[in-house]
Structure formats: C-alpha cells, structure tokens
Image (spheres, rainbow, N blue to C red):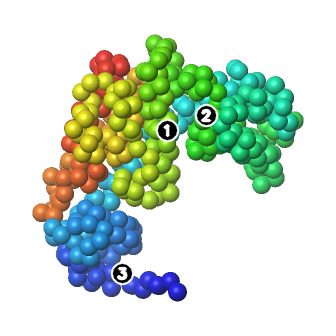
Amino acid sequence: MKKSKTFRTYTEQIDLMRSRGIGVPDRREALEALSTFSYYSLVNLNKHLYGGLDKRDFEGNPTLLDLQLAHMLNMNFYHLLLKGILYIEASFKTKLAYLVSREFGTQSGDTESSRHDFLGEEHYDRSNRASEGVLRALRNKLRFLLSDSNQNSYSHQFLAGNRQLPPWMFVHDIEFGLAIQWYKILKKSDREEICVKMIQGETGEPLSGPALDLSCDFFLAALELLREYRNTIAHGERVFPSEMAASLPEEPLFAVLPAGILSPEEYRLGTGLKDPFACLVTIVFFIHDPILMLSFLTEIRSQLDFARLIQENGTAGSLDSHQILGIPPFTLERLIRLSHHRFGGLSE
C-alpha cells in the first residue's frame, strides 16, 4: 500500500518550515507566499540548495524570502531557456521540412510505396530498423490532424478542404521528439546536410571527413539534450542536471566549439556536460541570425542583472545567484565570446 501524504493548513506549513530551519519572520507575508507559490515549490524544490534532497533540515538559515527569490529566479531563467530552445526547435524543423519537401515532394497519402509521398519508405534509411515505426507514427499524426477531435486547428481546416498538408506545415504539428526521430531515419547524406546547415548556417562552409562525423555526433546529442530540457521545463518541473539522461559527448563537443568557450578541465568537472550551461551554449551555437542572438543575449543579461540585484538586497541566507541557477559565474562572458566568434560585435 502506498504511503499517503498528510494535508497541512498554511499555518501548519509555517510551523513545519520553522522546525526545519527556515526563517519565517512575518506570518502574514508567509500566508500570501504559500497561497501563491505553494509549499512544494518553495521548500521541496529548493532543498538541493540548502543541504541536499536527502536532508530534512535546511542548512544556512535561509528565510522564506530567500526561498521565494530562488523560486522566482529559477522560473524566470528557465522560461528564458525554454524560449531559446523553441528558437532552435523551429530552426531545426524548418530545415527538416525544407529538405523533405525539396527531395521527396509535398504530398502524402496512405500508400507506403509512392515516390511522390514524402512519407514513402523508399526515401528513408531502410537499414534503420526504427524507420517503419517512425513513418507509421508520422502517418498516424497526419490522420489525427484530419480527425474531428482536431477540427478547430488550422491544419484540420486545411486538410478538410481536400488539400495536401505540405511538410513545412505538417512539421509544426509534430512534437520535437518525433521530429528528431524523423531526422534520424533520413538517409546519411540527408542527415548530414541538415546537420551542416544547423552548425554552419545556410551560407556557411561545408564540412567533410572526420569534422563532419564529429559535427553530426554533436548535433544529435545536442538535439536530445534540448528536447529533454524542453520537456522538463514545459511540464513545470525543476531541472536537476544529475537526472538528465542526455549529455554532450566530449570529443564532438570540443571539435565544434571555438577555443576559449570551455576548457577540458571545466568539462570534466561537469560544466558543459548536461548542465544549464551546456544547454545555453548549445542554443547560442545554433543561432545564425545576429538580431536573434542580440535579443537572446540581452534577455540573459537582464535576468542575471535582476538576480544580482536580488542577491544584493537579500538576507544573510541568500545564495549566489549563479549557484541558484546552476550556472558558472563566467556564463554570460563565454556566451558573448561565442557570439563574437560568429558575428563580431554585432550581437553584443
């Protein structure tokens, strides 16, 4: 039989916080905080900052205000991270749909053998045992878009008009994870083309040989890392890098990163492996538009300035904002350096 949790009133929650080493100087403010953010968000999701998830009592004498500020910083920062991931997801899907449309056509039916069907099996890597299942999932998604349960969507209205849904429209209706699976069943040359466009940009220099192989290894690992962060943040869960399954492999990462962005020593200590810094570097690395880069870096700077202001006005139990966010102090400096490598000073 599963162990049940005990319901506690806000007053009881305040007493429990005090018993665990959390300062609650103002009961009225505490009642408002608990009814706004919840005990779980303020206490349970911040345990790792004050002693560890396995500890009952909080170390360092934090106040409820410290926990509120930590929660707000995390929410703001990870919403920004999610926005950056969505930029890259859109770029990836655009390039995927462009290649599929150009090479395989713009029509799709239920037949699995038509050369003009962009989901026809002959267009994909038949040696990949996942191909059949992924193509089935994509066809099922197309059928779902035509179903009555989806009748209010633009795609349904488009299909209901007896029109084909082209790849550049269809790709926006599929999950990031399914788009990645779609990419993985492409033939090698098609996968490489998308990889090079994502890494070098549409007008960048081509890659070949070992550099291309390592770039493709990095690209696929980066997509999986972004997908995992995206899903975790979008579901309202706190990001704990130690629980992330995806990571950036060392050799491919250092093969594509410019010098001065990350050192091997920093990587071996966990920075750039699967932490938020790894996610940020991946986002910035895949941005090829200077205005988009400027916008994203400006928002990061704004968030870190806000975090610094909060820290300066915090209590004795306040933690360093970088520690709260799980990023190294040099984060913004390195991201700007990566941006300068691509655009010069245009993106600062």
Q: Is residue 5 above or below residue 237?
A: below
Spatial separation of the CA atoms under disc 2 and disc 3: 50 Å
The C terminus lies in quadrant: top left
Spatial separation of the CA atoms under disc 2 and disc 1: 11 Å
Amino acid under disc 3? Tyr
* Residue assigned mark 1: 223
For this view, does 3 lie left or right of residue 64? right
- Label for residue 10? 3
Query: Splitting the image into 4 quarters, where does residue 158 fall?
Result: top right
Instruction: Identify which residue is drawn at 81% across, 50% down.
Output: 147
Residue 4 shows in this picture: yes
For this view, does 74 lie left or right of residue 2? left
- Mark 2 or mark 1: name the one nearer the start of the chain: 2
- Mark 3 or mark 1: name the one nearer the start of the chain: 3
- Label for residue 289? none
Instruction: Identify which residue is drawn at 23% across, 40% down.
Output: 266
For this view, does 6 lie left or right of residue 119? left
Is there CB contact under 8 Å for labels 2 and 1? yes
Which element type, helix, strand or loop, lies under badge 1?
A: helix
Instruction: Identify which residue is drawn at 28% across, 82% down.
Output: 16
Amino acid under disc 2? Tyr
Amino acid under disc 1? Leu
* Residue assigned mark 2: 183
Q: Is residue 6 above or below residue 187?
A: below
| Whole-percent x, y for residue 311 in the image | 18, 53
